């Protein structure tokens, strides 16, 4: 019989605890705290993410039921609903944002050599935003529309491993273009953008920083044509040419030449036009890069389905940001776990297994290996639904 740590404690061993303590000291998170520390708060919120808890009362009830095991899980204090709510409300959310960045750096190092479908040495990012609707009466600070509240997650992901590198949380009224100003451009890297980010003054900053962008062109773009390049139309390419912006405003905002590539997608029967400031990559590679932009949409879909970021345990901006950053930390933690243990199961399967075995005593690697994963999946699939009764 296995007599080692419970699954939750084994999972939390992958956290760089000394880095977490540094983040806490940076913002004096444990100042005047007697029992319920920032680490206790993080573990409680991580438990809620891993087991899909619905509310603070739900978290309190479940953790109290496991009270004899909490010490071995790393939670030293008694978890009360009011205490957790107060911690989420008052403790600086930047503690958890900084710690998430520490884990993101660790995950990116692990996934740095992964292949994302294109033989490209440069780092490639996809940038987009997603909107999370909120009740305006409960979140009056999150203005979006006259009778609706919302926040936006402006996210930059590294396509190698789909690791979020930058997340900017704003109210729903913030225009997506403003989030471009938060990017710290990396020379030589590629940034894949949707056409909603068309702002030539901001795009020219990419060229000035020796970074590359790929973006869909708008249909009303005023320009004058330059030299053409030969394309193989069997691949779906229709044209590859140099152009110069001719609009009175855009020509001043972006005085350099651009490359325009037209592509026909036989599957959707649609034409696509892409703009880029890179003139060396093959035109087909440019179109393939833009196709990988869909990974950021899949990332948004995944975190909304598998993490608690659509319903919040608190209503203040600090509580909302705290919950989001801890959710991101859990996502990155599972990605690190998958890579370091070389697991074949995908992230959603790993989360499903962890959610029903978090307080069991079993070796984590054995629990998550392929044969055991199939057993747990069979258990999940064989559970009766409401309509089976």
Image (spheres, rainbow, N blue to C red):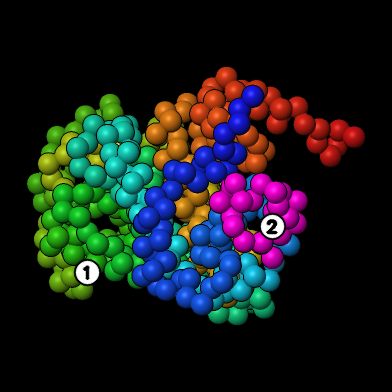
**Residue 94 at x, y percent in the picture:** 42, 68
Direction from residue 155 to residue 316 in the image, left or right? right
Question: Residue 225 in the image: x percent, y percent?
Answer: 14, 53
Image disc number at residue 201: 1
Inter-mark Cα distance, 2 to 1: 48 Å
Kindly identify the residue that appears in the image at 23 percent across and 32 percent down.
Answer: 119
Magenta-drawn stretch contains 375:
no
Magenta residues? 58-80
Residue 305 sits above or below residue 196 on the image: above
Seen at 41% across and 40% down, the residue is 336
**Magenta stretch secondary structure, dominant:** helix
Residue at 18% across, 70% down: 253
| Quadrant including the C terminus | top right
Looking at the rendered image, the disc whose residue lies closer to the viewer, 2 or 1, is 2
Residue 59 image label:
2
Tell how many labels.
2
């Amino acid at each position: 019989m296995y007599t080692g740590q419970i699954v939750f404690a084994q999972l939390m061993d992958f956290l760089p605890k000394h880095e977490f303590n540094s983040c806490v000291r940076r913002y004096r998170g444990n100042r005047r705290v007697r029992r319920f520390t920032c680490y206790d708060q993080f573990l409680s919120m991580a438990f809620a993410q891993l087991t899909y808890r619905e509310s603070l009362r739900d978290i309190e009830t479940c953790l109290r039921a496991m009270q004899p095991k909490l010490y071995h899980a790393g939670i030293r204090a008694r978890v009360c609903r009011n205490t957790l709510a107060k911690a989420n409300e008052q403790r600086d959310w930047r503690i958890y944002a900084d710690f998430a960045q520490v884990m993101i750096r660790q995950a990116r190092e692990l996934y740095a050599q992964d292949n994302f479908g294109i033989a490209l040495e440069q780092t490639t990012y996809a940038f987009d935003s997603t909107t999370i609707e909120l009740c305006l009466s409960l979140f009056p600070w999150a203005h979006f529309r006259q009778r609706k509240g919302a926040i936006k997650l402006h996210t930059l992901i590294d396509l190698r491993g789909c690791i979020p590198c930058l997340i900017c949380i704003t109210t729903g009224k913030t225009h997506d273009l403003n989030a471009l100003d938060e990017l710290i451009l990396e020379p030589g890297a590629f940034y894949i953008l949707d056409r909603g980010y068309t702002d030539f003054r901001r795009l020219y900053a990419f060229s000035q920083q020796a970074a590359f962008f790929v973006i869909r062109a708008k249909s009303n773009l005023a320009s004058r044509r330059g030299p053409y390049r030969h394309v193989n139309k069997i691949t779906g390419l229709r044209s590859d040419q140099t152009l110069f912006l001719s609009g009175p405003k855009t020509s001043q905002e972006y005085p350099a030449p651009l490359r325009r590539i037209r592509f026909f997608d036989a599957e959707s029967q649609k034409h696509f036009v892409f703009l880029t400031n890179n003139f060396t990559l093959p035109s087909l590679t440019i179109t393939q890069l833009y196709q990988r932009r869909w990974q950021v949409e899949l990332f948004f879909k995944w975190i909304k389905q598998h993490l608690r970021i659509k319903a919040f345990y608190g209503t203040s901006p600090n509580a909302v940001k705290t919950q989001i950053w801890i959710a991101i930390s859990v996502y990155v933690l599972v990605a690190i776990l998958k890579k370091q243990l070389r697991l074949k199961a995908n992230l959603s399967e790993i989360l499903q297994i962890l959610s029903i075995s978090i307080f069991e005593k079993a070796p984590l690697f054995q629990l998550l290996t392929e044969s055991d994963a199939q057993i747990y999946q069979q258990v999940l699939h064989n559970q009766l639904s409401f309509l089976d009764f």
